[in-house]
Amino acid sequence: GPLEEVSLPLYFGWFLLSSIQDKIKCTSMDFLKTLDTLEAFKKHLIDFSGKAEEVDLEQYFQPTGILHCTTKFCNYGKAEGAKEYAEKQAVKDSYGSIFNLSLGALFVTPRTFGARVSLTEEQLQLWPADADAEKQVESVPAAASLPLGSRAHVTLGCAEGVEPVQTGIDLLEILTLQQEGQQGEQVEEMELGTLTYYGTGKWLLNLREPISAPACFSSFYG
Ligand code: A2P
């Protein structure tokens, strides 16, 4: 019946607890504030505005709601593999449990702003089995050879008109470049860590101290 049809959520994921949300929002805003004052960033401004004009990154990225790391996008059951995922034993067993996510890097592109999540073996149990198929992002063909869970991230903001699904794709693009041996251009030692430029507006800040973020594994219906 109709109830069954809506019994699958929009997505499953880890939802960051509110205390750490505030901390991450502060840290990430500080990072943006510093980034757009750096000479190295100004040199590549054209990637962001199409012009060599200054951008206010804090305004450029719009917040996207409650901070979370999506595991499986189900689209209320319409996404491939949604039902199988919801029925996984690990998913049922962990539903409502708290995990500690490790946020190891922040990244910025002209489209999205996100944090990379490094999943533990235990957390990878909740990563969808069809993630390989999911990784076959048309725009990033080489992503198929990245380790499972590479896409794991928290979306921190999106440029106007950009959907949050783009954040994971942008992360895969950066990781693909790294895997292909692109060192990037190490531009700055910041207080938070090392900032690297990967070309065409792609910036990655490797955090000196990964942020440990308590998060509840649950789902979102919208
Ligand atoms: P993300 O995980 O990068 O934040 P929306 O509001 O656009 O429906 O998306 C809801 C959530 O599901 C967002 O967190 C979003 O991106 C994620 N998402 C949306 N579409 C997909 C998709 N096709 N594959 C994986 N995740 C998706």
Image: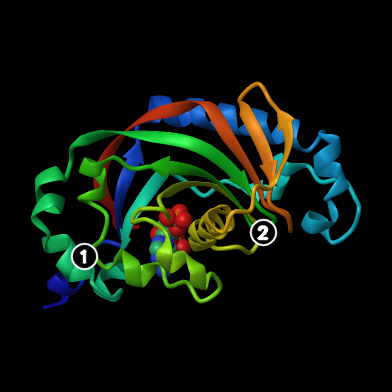
| CB-based contact (under 8 Å), mark 2 and mark 1 | no
Q: Residue at x 69, y 36 (%)?
A: 32
The answer to which quarter of the image holds residue 71 is bottom left
The answer to which quarter of the image holds residue 101 is top left
- Left or right: residue 159 versus residue 156 is right
Q: Residue furthest top?
A: 191
Of residue 207 and residue 214, the one placed in the foreground of this image is: 207
Q: Quadrant of ligand 1?
A: bottom left
Can you identify the residue that label 1 sits on? 8
- Vertically, is 191 above or below 179? above
SS under mark 1: loop
Of residue 27 and residue 47, the one placed in the foreground of this image is: 47
The amino acid type, in three-letter code, at marker 2 is Glu
Where's residue 127, x and y in %?
27, 54
Please state, as top left, top right, bottom left or bottom right, where the N terminus lies in the image. Answer: bottom left
Whether disc 1's CB lies below 8 Å from ligand 1 is answered: no
Q: Residue at x 31, y 44 (%)?
A: 14
Q: Residues within 10 Å of mark 2 (few under 14, many from 20)?
A: few
Q: Residue at x 64, y 64 (%)?
A: 161
Q: Residue at x 45, y 28 (%)?
A: 211
The amino acid type, in three-letter code, at marker 1 is Leu
Of residue 2 and residue 73, the one placed in the foreground of this image is: 73
SS under mark 2: loop
Q: Residues within 10 Å of mark 1 (few under 14, many from 20)?
A: many
Q: CA distance from mark 2 to mark 1?
A: 29 Å
- Left or right: residue 25 versus residue 19 is right
- Vertically, is 53 above or below 5? above
